Amino acid sequence: MKLYVDGKGKQVTVSMDPAPKNDQNGNQRSEKGTGRLMWSTQVFVLDETGGEVITITTAGEKPNVTVGQLVNPIQWEAIPWATNGRSGIAYRATELKAVTGASAK
């Protein structure tokens, strides 16, 4: 089951330029099944409850976004994980789409 994030009412701002998502050996990871390269983009998410910095992973072409730009994560998914006594939530999207014009308000 996929857990999608409702982005309504959330302002998502790029806080660090997209970078390759690397494995422990420094090699860029690729998506299982497709072989598309994976990218990590740090964003600041703000809503009525406050703000949080998260990293969203995408696969394929490097996201065409820059620091300070408002974005809309497409098919934004939250993926719970647990390993070696640690746990958290990973975030993934099919695309980080730049918010432009009237939709940026």
Image (tube, rainbow, N blue to C red):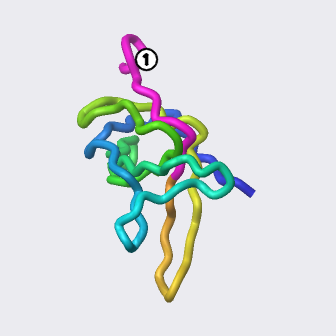
Q: Which residues are magenta?
A: 92-105
Q: Is residue 79 above or below residue 75?
A: below
Q: Is residue 105 left or right of residue 72?
A: left
The residue depicted at 28 percent of the width and 42 percent of the height is 17
From the viewer's side, name the closer residue of 8 and 82.
82
Quarter of the rendering occupied by the N terminus:
bottom right
56 and 8: which one is in front?
Answer: 56
- In percent of width and height, residue 65 lies at 34, 32
Q: Residue furthest top?
A: 102
Q: Is residue 96 highlighted in magenta? A: yes
Query: For this rendering, which residue is in front, 59 or 28?
Result: 28
Which residue is pictured at 43% across the width and 49% down the height?
A: 39
Q: Please, what secondary structure does the residue beneath circle 1 have? A: helix
Image quadrant in which you'd find residue 103: top left
Residue that badge 1 annotates: 103
User: Against 87, is 67 above or below?
Assistant: above
Instruction: Give 58 or 36, whichever is nearer the viewer.
Output: 36
**Quarter that holds the C terminus:** top left
Q: Residue at x 33, y 53 (%)?
A: 53
x, y percentage for residue 84? 50, 87
